[in-house]
Image (cartoon, rainbow, N blue to C red):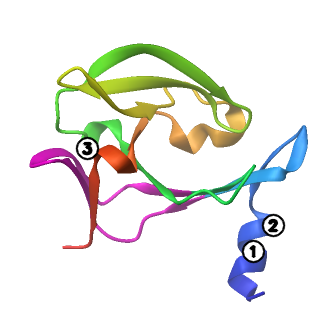
Amino acid sequence: MSDTSIVALRDAIRNPDNPNHMMVIKPAPRRMRVYAGDTLLADSTRALRVMELGKSVYDPVIYFPEEDVVASLGLVDKSTHCPIKGDASYVSLDGEEIGWAYKDPIPMSRQLKGHHAFWPSKSRLVEGE
């Protein structure tokens, strides 16, 4: 294991009830854009990359600051709870659920406050210029 991997694991946010459920939040070092079809949803140089390990190894997720979301998103009447992030609320584009946000995450995940993530199956992520 590399020194970087060891540091990331040491800095991981862990589920107090299950130490094998953890995540690492890191700044995304490049410009990130996300689209639904041809519609730009968000464009940011301040996005966060979340890497999570739980019941399986999850694909990394990019979270965009709310200020960098440019599409008009609606609210979905749905909420879920994650023991290491808190309560997620869901958003839609043209009536279809497209992503989620943590408006008030639990304290250990406060970096995610006001950030939106989008379903990879319903969006396209572009990293870099």
Q: Which residue is mark 3?
A: 68
Tell me if mark 2 has few (under 14), some (14-19) or many (20+) residues whose alpha carbon lies within 10 angstroms of its own: few
> Could you say where residue 13 lies in the image, as x and y percent from the top left?
74, 51
Q: Magenta part of the protein: which range?
A: 25-50
Residue type at mark 2 is Arg
Q: Is 33 placed above or below 64 here?
A: below
Q: How many marks?
A: 3
Q: Residue at (73%, 88%) from the top-left corner? A: 2
> Could you say where residue 42 lies in the image, as x and y percent from the top left?
23, 46
In the picture, the quarter occupied by the N terminus is bottom right
Q: Earlier in the sequence, mark 3 or mark 2?
A: 2
In the displayed structure image, the side of residue 128 where residue 81 appears, left or right: right
Q: Which SS class for mark 3?
A: helix
Residue type at mark 1 is Val
Q: Say if mark 2 contacts mark 1, CB within 8 Å.
A: yes
Q: Which residue is mark 1?
A: 7
Q: Is 79 placed above or below 15 here?
A: above
Q: Is 66 placed above or below 95 here?
A: below
Tell me if mark 1 has few (under 14), some (14-19) or many (20+) residues whose alpha carbon lies within 10 angstroms of its own: few
Q: Say if mark 3 contacts mark 1, CB within 8 Å.
A: no
In the picture, the quarter occupied by the C terminus is bottom left
Q: Which SS class for mark 2?
A: helix
Q: Residue 32 lies in what quarter of the image? A: bottom left
**Mark pair 3, 1: CA separation:** 29 Å
Q: Residue at (74%, 50%) from the top-left corner? A: 54
Q: Residue at (88%, 44%) from the top-left corner? A: 18
Q: Which SS class for mark 1?
A: helix
Q: Which residue is mark 2?
A: 10
> Could you say where residue 83 lies in the image, as x and y percent from the top left?
74, 33
Residue type at mark 3 is Asp
Report the residue that reaches farthest toward the bottom: 2
